[in-house]
Image (tube, rainbow, N blue to C red):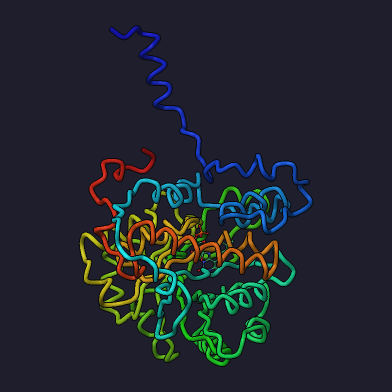
């Protein structure tokens, strides 16, 4: 029989907050821990996206670090974004011909072909990690032929970003409804003139993000206040541009269906990196909900997703459910400490990881991945913090 003390300690440990592993321990402390806080480790010693975050936490000042790192409320959405990938298992196949997997990475998004099913999600204030800010992002994207989506709240102007583009480079541009129709029209025209080929309309930020970590340093949302936006407004935006307008921040199957009904050519599953509303599902959980309740949506329109993506395997898990391309923001914000070379390295690392992980799953063509490659009824899947 359990003694009262044993029982008490069991209850206690159950109630204790389980420590959060922001990133797994893969030995970076042992390898680079002696690096002085005011210097960057050699880029050649960076082996994966989580390494850039490790570097940034030591190198950036508290204000800048907190702006990039913050989540909403107690940051449970932020943590769940990272942790939900760990709850889903692969079902790898063996003895298949995978020798052409690298060549299969090319991905067509809104009619334009990029080198991988991976893109750079929009984030503001890139100057917090490098004085050349978004210029590095757009140049790195060009060199690696990856889609870059520029934030409407970029540190550099749209003209500056546009001038840094390679000839013919296709970019996406994020949009917040902040002004009048005339302002919106002017922004869309500017995007079109800059060679932008898609608008990503952020729909997950109707109110301010409740960001405690950022509030301590006075660097909360750059898009503040309450925003008017409805599905009718979304349809109205189509009168102001001929570019595809993709709602960014879809978090339920109901809204995915409404997007299809509203004529959206694509949807972007996202919870803004856990920065807007705490206790919302991760992209993986939303993709699963759509897969279970309206799987046809993945065929009808292009589905994008982001949030907590740090490994090639995260990308593959989302793709297994039908997601066409997967993005990340913070890892690129941190890679930008190294300028264009850092961005290129980050993109190369992700591409390589997608290819080798796909190979180890028995996929000769990464786009052949489907739900048979993941274990949907895994008992560890349910629950947030299991
Ligand atoms: C510092 C920062 C700034 C961001 N700014 C924007 C923005 O201006 N517009 C937007 O739609 N999303 C913005 N986001 C959300 C990202 O586009 C993306 O959805 C999210 O960060 C992905 O999660 P990850 O950072 O874990 O990869 C921002 C995210 C971060 C971290």
Question: Position of 224 compared to 294: left or right?
Answer: right
Determine the residue positioned at 61% across, 52% down.
Answer: 51
Question: Position of 107 compared to 225: left or right?
Answer: left
> Where's residue 81, x and y in %?
44, 52
Q: Nearer the viewer, residue 20 or 46?
A: 46
> Where's residue 55, x and y in %?
67, 51
> Where's residue 270, x and y in %?
42, 63
From what the image shows, is residue 63 above or below residue 103? above
Determine the residue positioned at 52% across, 43% down.
Answer: 24
- Marks counted in the figure total 0
Q: Nearer the viewer, residue 366 or 111?
A: 366
Quadrant where the N terminus sits is top left
Quadrant where the C terminus sits is top left
From what the image shows, is residue 306 above or below residue 57? below
Determine the residue positioned at 34% across, 81% down.
Answer: 265
Determine the residue positioned at 72% across, 53% down.
Answer: 41
Q: Is residue 268 in sight in this rendering?
A: no
Q: Is residue 96 in sight in this rendering?
A: yes
> Where's residue 322, x and y in %?
30, 67
Q: Nearer the viewer, residue 359 or 30?
A: 359
Question: Position of 110 compared to 43: left or right?
Answer: left
Q: Nearer the viewer, residue 275 or 226?
A: 275
Question: Position of 68 compared to 285: left or right?
Answer: right
Q: Quadrant of residue 355?
A: bottom left
Q: Quadrant of residue 338?
A: bottom right
């Amino acid at each position: 029989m359990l003694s009262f003390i044993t029982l008490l300690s069991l209850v206690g440990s159950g109630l204790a907050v389980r420590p959060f592993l922001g990133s797994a321990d893969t030995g970076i402390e042992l390898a680079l821990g002696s690096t002085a806080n005011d210097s960057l480790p050699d880029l050649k010693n960076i082996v994966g996206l989580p390494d850039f975050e490790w570097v940034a936490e030591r190198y950036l000042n508290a204000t800048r670090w907190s702006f990039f790192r913050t989540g909403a409320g107690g940051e449970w959405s932020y943590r769940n974004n990272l942790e939900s990938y760990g709850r889903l298992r692969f079902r790898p196949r063996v003895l298949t011909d995978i020798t052409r997997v690298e060549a299969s990475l090319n991905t067509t998004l809104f009619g334009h072909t990029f080198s991988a099913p991976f893109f750079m999600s929009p984030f503001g204030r890139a100057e917090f990690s490098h004085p050349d800010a978004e210029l590095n992002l757009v140049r790195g994207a060009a060199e690696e032929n990856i889609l870059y989506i520029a934030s409407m709240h970029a540190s550099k102007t749209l003209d500056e970003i546009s001038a840094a583009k390679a000839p013919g480079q296709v970019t996406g541009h994020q949009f917040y409804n902040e002004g009048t129709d005339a302002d919106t029209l002017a922004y869309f025209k500017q995007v079109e003139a800059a060679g932008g080929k898609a608008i990503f309309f952020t729909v997950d930020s109707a109110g301010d993000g409740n960001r405690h970590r950022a509030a301590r340093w006075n660097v909360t949302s750059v898009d503040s206040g309450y925003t008017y936006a409805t599905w009718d407004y979304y349809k109205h935006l189509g009168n102001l541009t001929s570019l595809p307008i993709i709602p960014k921040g879809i978090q339920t199957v109901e809204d995915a269906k409404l997007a299809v009904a509203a004529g959206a050519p694509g949807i972007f599953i996202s919870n803004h990196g856990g920065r807007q509303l705490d206790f919302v599902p991760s992209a993986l959980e939303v993709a699963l909900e759509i897969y279970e309740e309206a799987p046809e949506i993945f065929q009808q329109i292009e589905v994008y997703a982001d949030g907590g993506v740090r490994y090639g395997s995260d990308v593959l898990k989302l793709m297994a459910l039908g997601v066409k391309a997967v993005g990340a923001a913070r890892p690129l914000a941190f890679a930008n400490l190294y300028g264009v070379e850092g961005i290129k390295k980050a993109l190369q690392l992700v591409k390589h990881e997608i290819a080798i992980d796909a190979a180890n799953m028995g996929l000769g063509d990464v786009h052949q991945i489907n739900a048979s490659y993941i274990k949907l009824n895994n008992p560890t899947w349910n629950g947030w913090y299991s």
